[in-house]
Structure formats: C-alpha cells, structure tokens
Image (cartoon, helix red, strand yellow):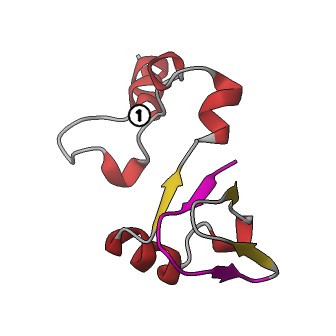
Amino acid sequence: MNIITNKSGKIIHLGSMMLLPGESGELPKAYENNPVVSFLEGRGAVEVARKNAEADEKGTPSEAPAENPSPAEIPAGEPSNAEAKRGAAKK
C-alpha cells in the first residue's frame, strides 16, 4: 500500500480519487507506475510514501533467500550445478 500526499495548492485527481491540498490517501494500484504520478512527484506537487508489500510479508530484504542465477548469467568458464552433478555421476 502506497500513500500519496498532495503537497501543492491545487486539487489533484487520480481516476475517481480526489486529493485536496494537504490531503493524503491510498494510491490506487493502477497508478503506482504511472508516469504522471512520477512527474508530479518530481515537481514536488505530491509525495508518495512507497511501501513494498512483498517485503512486509517476507520480512526484511536481508532475510529474503538469495535467488539462483539463471544459466544465462553464469560466466562461460564456470560450470552450473547441473553440469557439476552430471560430471560427478559419470565418474
């Protein structure tokens, strides 16, 4: 859930949501990555308090398990885990 606050002296409409000057509300999911919201934030007209819902559910980012790199990300000189297992099985 992201909270948006109108810091300007004008009324701001986001779809059916209306923010009076100084008023705050929940930013609709449809507007989270909207370029107009980013533009207004860059001008200082609005302030968006971004909260990562996924991190809230799983804990802090440092507690999140590390992802395994995809085969495309492994350098050519290093064997992947699958290749190492196959090599060990052949001996």
How far from the left and from the top, in percent, is residue 49?
Answer: 53, 48
Residue 3: say if magenta.
Answer: yes
* Three-letter amino acid code at the position of disc 1: Glu
- The answer to whether residue 23 is left or right of residue 44 is right
User: At 30% across and 34% down in the image, what residue appears?
Assistant: 79
Magenta-tinted stretch? 1-15
Q: Residue at x 65, y 38 (%)?
A: 54
Residue 83 among magenta residues: no
Residue 36 picture location, percent across and down: 50, 83
Q: Nearer the viewer, residue 27 or 83?
A: 27
Identify the residue under disc 1.
83
Looking at the image, is 53 positioned above or below residue 81? below
Q: Looking at the figure, which quarter contains the C terminus?
A: top left
Residue at the image position 57 percent from the left and 59 percent from the top: 5
Count up the numbered dots. Answer: 1
- Residue 39: name its quadrant: bottom left
Can you give x and y, in whole percent of width and height, for residue 47 in the image?
Answer: 47, 58
Outermost residue, right side: 16
The image quarter containing residue 30 is bottom right
Q: Residue at 48% of width from left, 81% of height from top? A: 35
